[in-house]
Image (spheres, rainbow, N blue to C red):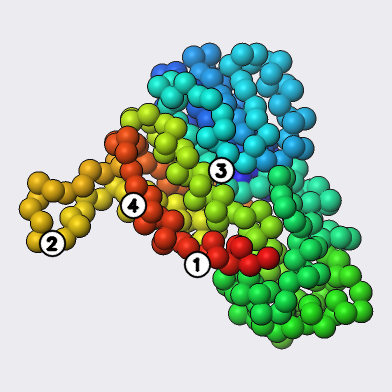
Amino acid sequence: MNATINLENKHFPVLLKELISIISPLYGGTFIDCTFGQGGYSEKILESKENNIIALDRDKDVLSNTSKFYKKYNKRFEFYNLKFSQLDQIKFKKHKIKGIIFDLGFSLSQIKNSQKGLSFSDKGKLNMKMGINDFSANEVISNMDEKNLTKVFKVFGDEKYSKKIAREIVIKRKDKAIKTEDLVEIIDNVKKYQKTKIHNSTKVFQALRILVNKEISELINGLINSFNLIPVGGIIAVVSFHSIEDRIVKFFFKNYSEQKNSSRYLPEAEVSERCFKLLSKKPILPTLSEIRQNPPSRSAKLRYGIKTNDKCNFNEFREKFKNLINVEDLR
């Protein structure tokens, strides 16, 4: 999330001080910003004239933000309109890369863009495409069968009323195309007697966004590609915003930072090498001060690891979350 929103609708890069402290840009190097957005992290890193930024973003709308960076920072800034799972398509000078940053949320400009349909208050056709997509939320709601809709809402949104909501969607779409406001109304009607602290539509909208943008496989492939690209000693840092993302990121760092015998009967000398060094197993959370200034940051978690080994087999990583990827492929 390169920006979140406070009550004054200002741009705030989340956990900026903490991230900068981790990657130590004062000593110079090349950093890859995998989710450029409004450029909050990139701009802070580029304050040091010894630094270079290679930025990516799947959303072509952020191109308007890159012009000032090219003008101000010239050859120290490069931008590619790619998903971070496509990191391996860019030719890097691997030895110069010091850190790779992932910020898994979405920016203020994306939320305010009604054509993207990320907000419950939007009107009109469902979308939720963040860029370089195969389908939209409208196609999912219009065509996916009840069983699969239920599974998507349950797995990606942890929605308690997933089955009832899916059934109502299938019934209502027989009469007319379901727009954003119609979906919100369906969910409100199903959950009208339920008292929750979050908006009734939050979980369903999250589930649709994850599905449309294939956020699970994107994250898994992006993390693996980042490991393959960065040299030993480089840092990979990830800011996540919901439990599914954090579970994936936590496993990636924790599982591959622990020395494990393939069997308890093997001698200690046969312990496999670790892929990461973790300075902290717990995530870094926003301070109370940051949360007061920028309430949406309250769900952010920052995890990071220092690469210690140039070879790592990620089959277990992929297998661990295979069930989520299978749901992502339901359409």
Q: Secondary structure at mark 2?
A: loop
Q: Determine which of the numbered discs, if any, sits on residue 254 in the image.
A: 4
Q: CA distance from mark 2 to mark 4?
A: 20 Å
31 and 202: which is toward the camera: 31
Q: CA distance from mark 3 to mark 1?
A: 19 Å
Q: Give the vertical position of 213 relative to 48 (above or below).
A: below
Question: How would you rate the neighbour count of disc 4 (Cα within 10 Å): few for under 14, some for 14-19, many for 20 or more?
Answer: some
Q: Secondary structure at mark 3?
A: helix
- Please tell me which of labels 1 and 4 falls first in the chain: 4
Q: Are marks 2 and 1 in contact (CB under 8 Å)?
A: no
Residue type marked 1: Asn
Q: Secondary structure at mark 4?
A: helix
Residue type marked 4: Lys
Residue 223 in picture, x, y percent from top left: 47, 44
- Please tell me which of labels 2 and 4 falls first in the chain: 4
Residue type marked 2: Arg
Q: CA distance from mark 2 to mark 1?
A: 28 Å
Residue type marked 3: Ser
Identify the residue position indicated by label 2 in the image: 264
Identify the residue position indicated by label 3 in the image: 85
Question: How would you rate the neighbour count of disc 3 (Cα within 10 Å): few for under 14, some for 14-19, many for 20 or more?
Answer: some
Identify the residue position indicated by label 1 in the image: 323
Q: Determine the residue positioned at 44% across, 52% down.
A: 249
* Image quarter hosting the N terminus: top right
- Please tell me which of labels 3 and 2 falls first in the chain: 3
Q: Answer whether residue 33 is visible to the viewer in this image.
A: no
- Please tell me which of labels 3 and 1 falls first in the chain: 3
Question: How would you rate the neighbour count of disc 2 (Cα within 10 Å): few for under 14, some for 14-19, many for 20 or more?
Answer: few
Q: Are marks 3 and 1 in contact (CB under 8 Å)?
A: no
